[in-house]
Amino acid sequence: MEIANIFFQVTIFVLFFSISFPFLVSKFDNNLNYLDQLVFNIIIQINLILFLSFLNVSLKTILIVYFIYLSICVLFQLKNIIKIKLIFKKDNYFYLFLLIICLVLCLDISYSLTLGWDAQKFWIPKALNFYNYETIDNLSNVPNPQYPFLGSLLWATFWKISFFPEEYTGRLVYVFLYCVSLASLTETLKLSSTIKIIFFTILILLSYNYIRFDGHQDILIFCLISIGAKTLYTIISDNQKISLYQTVLLILICNALIWTKQEGTVYAFIIIFTLFFFSKIFLYKRIVFLGLVILLFSARIFIYKFYNLEVSLNSCCWSDLSLNALIEKFTFDRIITIIKFFLFIFLKNSFFLLGLVFLIISFFSNNILKKDMYIYFFYLMIYGFIFSAYITSELDLIFMFKSGGLDRLIFSSSPLYILIVTRYINAQNLKI
């Protein structure tokens, strides 16, 4: 019965997310493969579900509108559905392997039903709020109403439409997004489908752990950053002019990040700053990107204010943000403690170690890739933010590190290390 439920749920993901919106994606960019279209559809649809929640309607209404949207898309794109079948014939091995891996991981989730501490305290109450047909304004009655809720909303949405409505079925959407996002990064390799399958398998083996899918929202941040990393790669490393497809995709990724976790807002701005400083698009376009992300963040504040939800930081960690209080926390002992735990977590992160190995190889082979400067900038900003968050916190540092928060932060921001690997491999001009 569990296997039937999982197969049904994964089928739902594939069918729903394969349906493109009425304006054909090919009109945005003529070089898109099926996986690019799938990623674009995912980002469009999760933002649609999010936007509908802003109207203070129940999940029942959201689902009705969502199904109407999908039905309209199908009616307008019967020819496009035929094209999707043809694309499958071209790269069927890779896509079939992606589907099999997704099914296997979903099966593992179904036999490991433990929820993480944060998931129990913060995220599943929000999911239950939507699952029980409560609306956004009722989030003031759940723990930590200042936390964003996109992940919990998706959890409730796909939990509700499951064939057998078990709680874990809602979390399977994270598994699907995880597999698709890693497959998207794999597509940066300019090699055969067989090599891509091997590389994708290695990424799964290095990064999969049930604890990533126990209800914490960091896996959704990981997926969004992975897709954003692939987009940055095509714009910056390949020196492409930014297309309408990439423009819409990046903006909606940033919006999803803003509504996933508190730190997602910082990640959204870091992605845009990376694009701002390292892309070759016109300055006015970069300014427009930055302005749009500021507007999206302002919209989140407005919506929270409108529904009387908290917009403050976690008061348990940062209650006194005065300059004197912040300066007093910059002590030698605290800095050493943070650096020590940073190094420990880095040595546990497989993607960091993989990226480091290829960075060293490129250094000794005199093949230091200057085009990767945007990756180093991205991580300088990310780790600067994380260090600042810990050094200014009022909680005990040892307690914070042992709670696993740093491990999740490093993991969620780790996808760009994969680009160091794929850039080096592509630079060798291998014919395999």
Image (cartoon, rainbow, N blue to C red):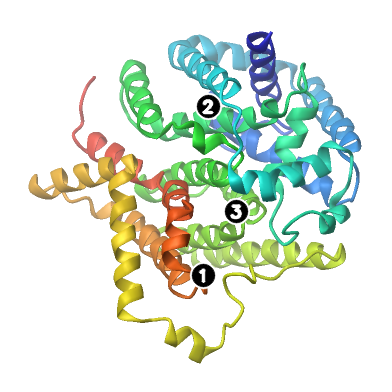
Q: Residue at x 50, y 49 (%)?
A: 242
Quarter of the image where the C terminus is located: top left
Per the model, the C-alpha gap separating discs 1 and 3 is: 29 Å
Q: Indicate the quadrant where residue 340 lies.
A: bottom left
The percent position of residue 216, horizontal first and vertical second, equals 58, 44
On screen, residue 3 versus residue 233, left or right, reads: right
Give left or right: position of 269 versus 298.
Answer: left
What numbered label is drawn on residue 395? 1
Kindly indicate whether the residue at mark 3 contacts the one at mark 1 (C-beta within 8 angstroms). no
Q: Amino acid at mark 1?
A: Leu
The residue that appears at 89% across and 31% down in the rendered structure is 64
Q: Which mark is residue 254?
A: 3
> Residue at position x 88%, y 51% from top?
55
Spatial separation of the CA atoms under disc 2 and disc 3: 20 Å
Q: Which residue is mark 2?
A: 35
- The answer to which quarter of the image holds residue 291 is bottom right
User: Horizontally, is 380 left or right of 93 in the view?
Assistant: left
Crowding around mark 1 (Cα neighbors within 10 Å: few <14, some 14 to 19, many 20+) is: few
Q: Which part of the image, by quadrant, shows the N terminus?
A: top right
Looking at the picture, which amino acid does disc 3 mark? Cys
- Looking at the image, can residue 297 be seen? yes
Residue 237 pos. (x, y %): 35, 47
- How far apart in space, not on screen, are marks 2 and 1 (Cα)? 43 Å
Report the amino acid beneath label 2.
Answer: Leu
Residue 352 visible in the displayed image: no
